[in-house]
Amino acid sequence: MPANTVKFLSPEQPLADKPRHVAVIMDGNGRWAKRYGLPRAAGHRRGVEAVKKISRIFVRRGIPYLTLFAFSSENWKRPPTEVEALLKLLATTLERELGRMHENGICLRVIGDLSRFPAPLQRRIAEAVALTRDNRALNLTIAVNYGGRWDIAQACRSVAESVMGGQLSPDKVTPALVESRLCTRDLPEPDLFIRTGGEQRISNFLLWQLAYTELCFVEAYWPEFDAKHLDQALMMYARRQRRFGKTGEQVRELQA
Ligand code: IPE
Ligand code: IPE
Ligand code: MG
């Protein structure tokens, strides 16, 4: 456990509830593959298996929102063969798993700049989202070609268009208004952020949305992340006191 995740607990410290929304940077596929002498693509394939497993565990744990970072706006800088393998994996996973996801009550959302993807893939994504729209067991959001800076910029563009069009006056541009233009507008704020693979950075994930999220960094590589790791993160989360700018005493009083 990294030193900065260890926290002193006083016996009377109020506990955070179970998170409603968990956002995950699934990192370490490549290093996992290397450890076993496999190509990086094999690590990504195992990463998909981990997504399937973890989604089922979320349903069982009754955590309604899971958001996964699958491909960042910076991941295009990787070797073309890896980018191609990742996009192919996205398309085949969607094709193979959609039926099962729908049966299991998963409501799928995809966030990110999809305009860079081939038109048939964009269409398949839109169909999958429409098919699963009313499912309630788990809200699974996959971030592809997503970047936090892109999200904020596209929200700004949308606000600017409303102002230019005369539907919005500049003095109505508040944090809540900007938030309503982010591509996560249908999701609650993430309560818990988990990054696997040992790195302690945000890598342009949900920059705006993570403002008050509890951060948890896990050494395990994503393909090996399982129920045990998740439960450790949930236990760590349960011990945190979320103050949102208030004092610890104020929070305790509110919870009493
Ligand atoms: C995360 O694993 C998956 C993606 C970024 C697509 P990585 O591929 O980044 O694995 P490492 O960090 O190189 O081990
Ligand atoms: C972040 O991982 C993106 C995803 C997991 C999709 P990276 O492996 O791309 O992040 P950096 O480059 O190490 O910061
Ligand atoms: Mg990585």
Image (spheres, rainbow, N blue to C red):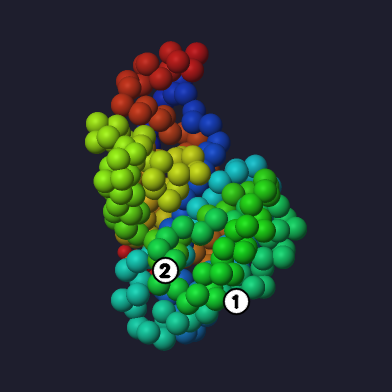
For disc 2, the neighbor class at 10 Å (few under 14, some 14 to 19, many from 20) is few
Say if residue 90 shows up in the picture: no
Percent position of residue 231, x then y = 56, 47
In the image, farthest residue toward the front: 166
Q: Which residue is mark 1?
A: 92
Q: CA distance from mark 2 to mark 1?
A: 19 Å
Q: Which residue is mark 2?
A: 115
Rendered image quadrant of residue 95: bottom right
Above or below for 175 versus 243 = below
- Residues tagged 2 and 1 counted as in contact (Cβ below 8 A): no
User: Which residue appears at 32% of the width and 20% of the height?
Assistant: 247
Q: In the rendered view, does 176 fall on the left or right side of 256?
A: left
Of badges 2 and 1, nearer the viewer stands 2
Percent position of residue 16, x then y = 49, 31
User: Which residue appears at 37% of the width and 84% of the height?
Assistant: 80
User: Which residue appears at 47% of the width and 24% of the height?
Assistant: 14
Percent position of residue 45, x then y = 55, 75
User: Which residue appears at 70% of the width and 52% of the height?
Assistant: 105
Q: In the rendered view, does 211 fall on the left or right side of 134?
A: left
* Residue nearest the observer in this picture, 107 or 70: 107
* Residue nearest the observer in this picture, 55 or 131: 131
For disc 1, the neighbor class at 10 Å (few under 14, some 14 to 19, many from 20) is few
Say if residue 187 shows up in the picture: yes
Above or below for 220 versus 252 = below
